[in-house]
C-alpha cells in the first residue's frame, strides 16, 4: 500500500454523465491509497458506478460550492488523510496523476519544508454534450505562461486569469489548520481566495507534467455549462474578484501591497493606451 493517504473530494449536483467520468478518473489511478469523498448537492446517486473506498456526503448548500468543499474537508480530516485534492465532477486526471504528484512533492518538501502543496500543468478540454454523448472539440494548455518548475510566486497568482484549476492541485491536510477552510460566502472565485491565502503561509511547488484535464463546456444544457461561461454570472464574477482584491488591500500586508502595485501598473498601461490612441487620432486628423 502506498504511504500517503489522499482524500479526493468531488463536488457534484445532478450531473450523472459527468460524475461517472469523474468516478472512473479516480478509479483509474495507479496510486490506490485514497478515499473518494463525493459531496452530493443533488439527487440520489443510486445509479452511479462507485468503485473503491467511497464516502457519499449528502448536503443542501443552495449552490454554494465552497460549502460543499468544506463538507468534504471535514470528512477528509476525520479520515486522517495526508493530502487533499479537489476533483470536480466535470474534470479528470491522467492515471499517473497521484503517483507522480506525490513523488514530486516528496522531492520538493525535502528541499523546502515550507512546501505544502503542488500543482501540475493542465490541458483545457473544450467539449459539448448531446444526449448521453460527450464530444471533445479541442484541447489547449491551461494558463501556459505559469512557470514549469520551482515554486509558484505570489505575483503569478495576483491576476485571477492566472489562477490554476482545483484539478491541478493537491496539498497537505495540516495546511488547513493555518489557512482556514474555503470561504462559503464566495459563490465564485472561492478557489482563488483559498489559493491566495495558501500562498500567504506556504509554498506551492510546480511540475511540468500535463497530468490534469480541466473540462469546459460553453454550450449545452444549463446544468452542464461551466459556471464561468454562464452569462448570469459575469457580474457576479466581477464583484467577487473586486471583493477579494479589496480584502487584501484593506489588510495592508505584502499581498495587498503587491495587488496595489499591480492595480497601479494596470492603470498606467490603460493611460498609455489612451495617450497612444489620442496620438493616432491626431496624426490621422493632420493627414486629412
Image (tube, helix red, strand yellow):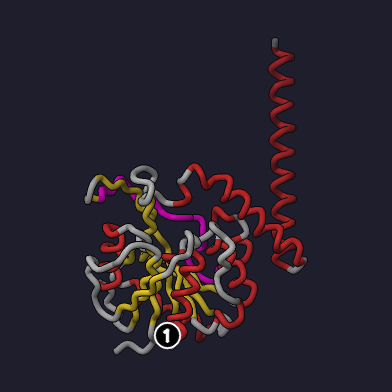
> What residue is rendered at 60% in x and 76% in y?
179
Q: Was residue 251 drawn as part of the magenta stretch in this picture?
A: no
Left or right: where does residue 72 sit relative to residue 176?
A: left
> What residue is rendered at 36% in x and 89% in y?
3
Left or right: where does residue 5 sit relative to residue 275?
A: left
- Image location (x, y in percent) of residue 43: 33, 63
Magenta stretch, residue numbers: 134-153
- Image location (x, y in percent) of residue 48: 24, 66
Could you say which is closer to the camera, residue 20 or residue 166?
Answer: 20
> What residue is rendered at 69% in x and 17% in y?
284
Q: Residues within 10 Å of mark 1 (few under 14, many from 20)?
A: many
On-image quarter of the C terminus: top right
> What residue is rendered at 56% in x and 85% in y?
113
Quadrant assignment, res 60? bottom left
Q: Was residue 139 drawn as part of the magenta stretch in this picture?
A: yes
Quadrant assignment, res 93? bottom left
In the image, residue 144 above or below residue 182: above
- Element on which disc 1 rests: loop
For this orientation, the residue located farthest to the top is 288
In the image, residue 5 above or below residue 257: below
Query: Residue 252: in sight, yes or no?
Result: yes
Could you say which is closer to the camera, residue 91 or residue 158?
Answer: 91
Say which residue label 1 marks.
81
In the image, residue 50 above or below residue 230: below
Query: Residue 99: in sight, yes or no?
Result: no
- Count of numbered tags: 1
- Image location (x, y in percent) of residue 198: 58, 72
On-image quarter of the N terminus: bottom left
- Image location (x, y in percent) of residue 94: 31, 67
Amino acid at each position: 500500500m502506498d504511504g500517503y493517504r489522499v482524500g479526493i473530494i468531488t463536488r457534484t449536483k445532478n450531473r450523472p454523465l459527468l460524475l461517472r467520468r469523474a468516478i472512473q478518473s479516480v478509479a483509474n489511478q495507479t496510486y490506490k491509497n485514497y478515499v473518494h469523498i463525493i459531496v452530493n448537492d443533488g439527487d440520489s446517486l443510486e445509479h452511479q458506478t462507485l468503485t473503491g473506498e467511497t464516502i457519499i456526503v449528502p448536503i443542501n448548500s443552495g449552490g454554494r460550492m465552497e460549502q460543499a468543499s468544506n463538507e468534504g474537508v471535514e470528512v477528509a480530516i476525520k479520515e486522517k488523510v495526508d493530502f487533499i485534492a479537489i476533483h470536480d465532477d466535470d474534470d479528470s486526471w491522467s492515471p499517473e496523476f497521484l503517483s507522480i504528484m506525490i513523488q514530486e512533492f516528496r522531492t520538493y518538501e525535502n528541499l523546502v519544508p515550507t512546501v505544502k502543496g503542488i500543482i501540475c500543468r493542465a490541458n483545457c478540454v473544450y467539449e459539448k454534450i448531446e444526449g448521453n454523448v460527450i464530444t471533445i472539440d479541442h484541447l489547449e494548455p491551461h494558463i501556459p505562461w505559469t512557470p514549469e518548475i520551482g515554486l509558484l510566486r505570489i505575483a503569478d497568482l495576483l491576476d485571477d486569469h492566472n489562477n490554476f484549476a482545483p484539478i491541478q492541485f493537491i496539498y497537505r491536510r495540516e495546511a488547513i489548520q493555518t489557512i482556514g477552510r474555503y470561504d462559503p460566502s464566495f459563490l465564485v472565485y472561492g478557489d482563488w481566495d483559498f489559493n491566495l491565502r495558501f500562498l500567504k503561509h506556504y509554498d506551492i511547488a510546480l511540475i511540468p507534467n500535463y497530468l490534469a484535464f480541466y473540462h469546459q463546456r460553453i454550450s449545452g444544457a444549463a446544468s452542464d455549462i461551466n459556471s464561468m461561461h454562464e452569462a448570469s454570472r459575469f457580474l457576479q464574477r466581477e464583484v467577487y474578484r473586486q471583493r477579494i482584491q479589496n480584502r487584501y488591500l484593506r489588510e495592508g500586508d505584502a499581498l495587498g501591497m503587491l495587488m496595489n502595485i499591480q492595480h497601479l501598473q494596470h492603470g498606467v498601461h490603460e493611460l498609455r493606451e489612451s495617450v497612444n490612441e489620442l496620438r493616432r487620432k491626431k496624426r490621422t486628423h493632420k493627414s486629412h
